[in-house]
Amino acid sequence: MRLSTLQIVLLVILAVLIIAIVTLYFLGKKAEKKQAEQQEQIEAYKQTVNMLIIDKKRLKITQSGLPQMVIDQTPWYMRWQKLPVVKAKVNAKIMTLICDERIFADVPVKKEVKAVVSGIYITDVKGLHGKKATVEQQKKKGFFKRAWDTVMEKAGAKPLK
């Protein structure tokens, strides 16, 4: 039984793919365990704090104003990625905190809120009276939508809301 060159190439590609899938599976399991441990630590140290949100931005960790110790502990491949950073006044101190990606859009600016904080990590934000804080942001209109609205307004038609 003699294999053609095409069959040999396909077998090698198949073997490489199988090895890659098995490696990714085990790396995924390891990362999942690590994430579960980190989540347990966050849950253990969380506390509710009243704070006035001054500003929120997405910044690189080197530009964020976080303590140097935090920047030094960050892996090298994460230093170019932008983080959701919140500048807030907690009691009398102005602090720079890292916000959870899921709630970053819901954090209101220039409002006083109750936030669940674990170290320098904000995990949840509620309004001052217990209800969820909401941000009233209007979605930016694209170029063609603005042009269409301008044309319709000049034509005398009322824009649809």
Image (spheres, grey):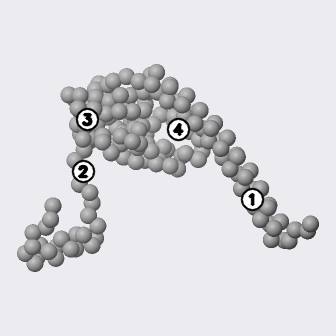
Q: CA distance from mark 2 to mark 4?
A: 31 Å
Disc 2 marks which residue? Answer: 137
Identify the residue at image location x=34%, y=38%.
Answer: 87
* Between discs 3 and 4, the one toward the N terminus: 4
Q: For this view, does 149 lie left or right of residue 50?
A: left
Tag 4: residue type? Ile
Disc 4 marks which residue? Answer: 71
Disc tally is 4
Disc 3 marks which residue? Answer: 132
Disc 1 marks which residue? Answer: 14
Q: CA distance from mark 3 to mark 4?
A: 31 Å
Answer yes or no: is residue 143 visible: yes
Mark 1 crowdedness (10 Å alpha carbons): few <14, some 14-19, many ≥20: few
- Label 3's element? loop
Tag 2: residue type? Gln
Instruction: Please say if 155 is above or below 10.
Output: below
* Between discs 1 and 2, the one toward the N terminus: 1
Q: Nearer the viewer, mark 1 or mark 2?
A: 1
Query: 37 or 24, which is in the foreground?
Result: 24
Answer yes or no: is residue 89 visible: no
Mark 2 crowdedness (10 Å alpha carbons): few <14, some 14-19, many ≥20: few
Q: Nearer the viewer, mark 2 or mark 4?
A: 2
* Between discs 2 and 3, the one toward the N terminus: 3
Q: How far from the left and from the top, in percent, is residue 56?
A: 33, 43
Q: Nearer the viewer, mark 1 or mark 3?
A: 1
- Label 2's element? loop
Identify the residue at image location x=87%, y=68%.
Answer: 3
* Between discs 2 and 4, the one toward the N terminus: 4
